[in-house]
Image (cartoon, rainbow, N blue to C red):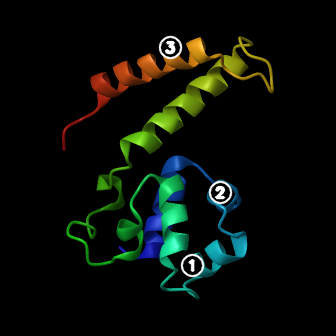
Amino acid sequence: MNIVDKLNYLKAKLNITTEELANQSGVPVGTINKILSGETRNPTGKTATKLAKVLGVTAEFLINDDLEGQNKAPDTLLISSEARVKKVYDILHQALLDAGWLTPGEHLTEQQAKILSAMIDILDATFTRNT
């Protein structure tokens, strides 16, 4: 897989737009669009590192087409544990908002965050499959 395929797959897997990726990574939308269009084939290490951090993979994974195992089907790619936890945390936070247990703009207390973190650990241990 090349960087375009990897970026598109990971954006879809994390359900984030190019604009959200730009905001979270600090990489300009135009730069990301040049990579996605193939105009920029080899982004700088700094750019790749910023994007990789948000996407939960290594910069090497993004930019190196020759890493072993990268030509597998996209659904066999693994997102880092940290990115998975963030996604679950975001989903749980949204569920709390939707249920009316939090109001828009309200943040979780430290105790609530610890409880959600423990729930995520339980979910992760229960539902993670060994591949």
From the viewer's perspective, is 33 left or right of 78?
right
Please tell me which of labels 1 and 3 falls first in the chain.
Answer: 1
Q: Amino acid at mark 3?
A: Ile
Q: CA distance from mark 1 to mark 3?
A: 39 Å
Q: Are marks 2 and 1 in contact (CB under 8 Å)?
A: no
From the viewer's perspective, is 17 left or right of 13?
right
In the rendered image, residue 121, in percent from the top left (x then y), is placed at 37, 23
Q: Secondary structure at mark 1?
A: helix
Q: Where does label 2 land, which residue?
A: 17
Task: Indicate the quadrant where residue 101 lies.
Answer: top right
- 2 vs 3, front mark: 3
Q: Secondary structure at mark 2?
A: loop
In the depicted view, which residue is nearer to us: 32 or 47?
47
Q: Is residue 104 above or below residue 82?
A: above
Please tell me which of labels 2 and 3 falls first in the chain.
Answer: 2
Q: Which mark is residue 115?
A: 3
Dot 1 surroundings within 10 Å: few (below 14), some, or many (20 or more)?
Answer: some
Q: Secondary structure at mark 3?
A: helix
In the rendered image, residue 127, in percent from the top left (x then y), is placed at 31, 27
What residue is drawn where x is 29% and y is 25%?
Answer: 125
Q: CA distance from mark 2 to mark 1?
A: 14 Å
What residue is drawn where x is 58% and y is 88%?
Answer: 39
Please tell me which of labels 2 and 1 falls first in the chain.
Answer: 2
In the rendered image, residue 22, in percent from the top left (x then y), is placed at 67, 62
Q: Where does label 1 land, which residue?
A: 35
Q: Amino acid at mark 1?
A: Ile
Image quadrant occupied by the C terminus: top left
Dot 3 surroundings within 10 Å: few (below 14), some, or many (20 or more)?
Answer: few
Q: CA distance from mark 2 to mark 3?
A: 29 Å
Q: Amino acid at mark 2?
A: Thr
